[in-house]
Amino acid sequence: MDSTVMLGHGSGGTMMKRIIDDVFFAAYAGDELLRGDDAAVLPAPAPGERLAFSTDSFVVTPHFFPGGDIGRLAVCGTVNDVATSGATPRYLSVGFVLEEGFPIDDLRRICNSMAECAREAGVALVTGDTKVVNRGHGDGVFINTSGVGTLAPDVELGGARCRPGDKVLVTGTLGDHGITIMSCRESLSFSADLESDAAPLNHLIADVLAAAPHTRCFRDPTRGGLASTLNELAAQSATDITVEEDAVPVKPAVLGACEMLGYDPLQVANEGKMVCVVAPDEADAALAAMRANRYGADAAIIGEVAAAQPERGPKVFLRTAFGGTRILDMLVGEQLPRIC
């Protein structure tokens, strides 16, 4: 057991899983938390109604980057987490931790970005909190958003529902956000059109559920990227997942940057993409629904779920472009700190 908190505990990989299991789950996890999904599904006061609830904190640096800023990221992140349950996001809370000396014009710009993104998603920012810390103790601004959505009685999604034969889809190109943040932070120039993919995906998810009602789950591949997300789903459902490397959409600029920096694009963070597992006979319908949405134009079917071998447990495999197969592991340690 680790004796101190390290950056790797926020990576989305094995270190984060360890601190969640050994500290948070051990202290206070109930049935809802132990499911391990992005949003908790809770009973509402009226019979038959349910609520989805999620919370997230955002510490990205820099605060402004091509394709978005910390405010857009905060709205998109929580909207998407609530929507993964199949719920319709309704309301968000916003908590700010501001550092003394942070420019009011920058704060106003962040708030305007949040308002614009909330209008696009169709959610309301209904309550909040503001704290100010001493100069040098807050890195400008941190934001927490919590979200509540309403869930229809017949919708039941979750990583544990993946079954052998199911198809795995992604809604677009991977690694855009993480590489954009890294290029801004280190003043690197990879491509003039490289920008974050931060986007609210609740309408896309609703479109997919309408076209493919037997969808098993959605999961946004943020910290730890696609590799960590698929390993989470395999563990939850006790299955194997095999991904075709050639089928995974990655922009050439992102691929080139990853090769230069030594990153695996399948472990780089995304903020406007979804992994979706669907029944095999609905995969084409789900894909068509994704591609009809502005945020799903590059969607692809990338793999398949299979039964795991009991003697070794669930695994994720990558079938490479050269015809070989390798294990696709979760991210270990911290690859790109402070990306969301």
Image (cartoon, helix red, strand yellow):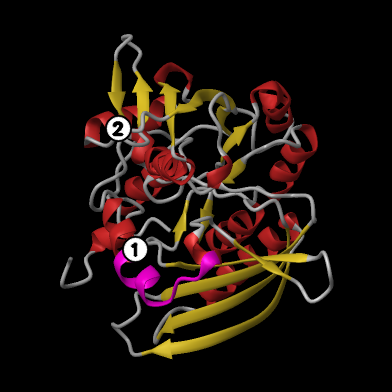
Based on the displayed image, in which of its 4 quarters is residue 23 positioned? bottom left
Q: Can you say whether 113 is above or below 319 in the image?
A: below
Residue at screen point 34% across, 36% down:
313
Q: Secondary structure at mark 2?
A: loop
Residue at screen point 43% across, 58% down:
340
Residue at screen point 37% across, 42% down:
268
Could you give the CA–CA distance between mark 1 and mark 2, rounded to whole angstroms?
A: 23 Å
Q: Amino acid at mark 2?
A: Glu
The spot of residue 104 in percent (x, y) is 52, 80
Tell me if residue 75 is in the magenta stretch. no
The spot of residue 240 in percent (x, y) is 42, 30
Q: Amino acid at mark 1?
A: Asp
The spot of residue 200 in percent (x, y) is 64, 51
| Closest to the observer, 106 or 176 | 176
- Image check: 90 left or right of 137? right
Question: Looking at the image, do the residues carrying marks 1 and 2 touch, with CB atoms under 8 Å apart?
Answer: no
Quickly name the residue at label 1.
21
The region drawn magenta spans 20-31
Q: Earlier in the sequence, mark 1 or mark 2?
A: 1
Which is more foreground, mark 1 or mark 2?
A: 2
- Image check: 206 left or right of 197? right
**In which quadrant will I find the N terminus?**
bottom left
Dominant SS of magenta comes to helix
| Closest to the observer, 130 or 116 | 130
| Closest to the observer, 94 or 279 | 279
Residue at screen point 36% across, 28% down:
309
What mark, if any, has residue 311 been given in the picture? 2
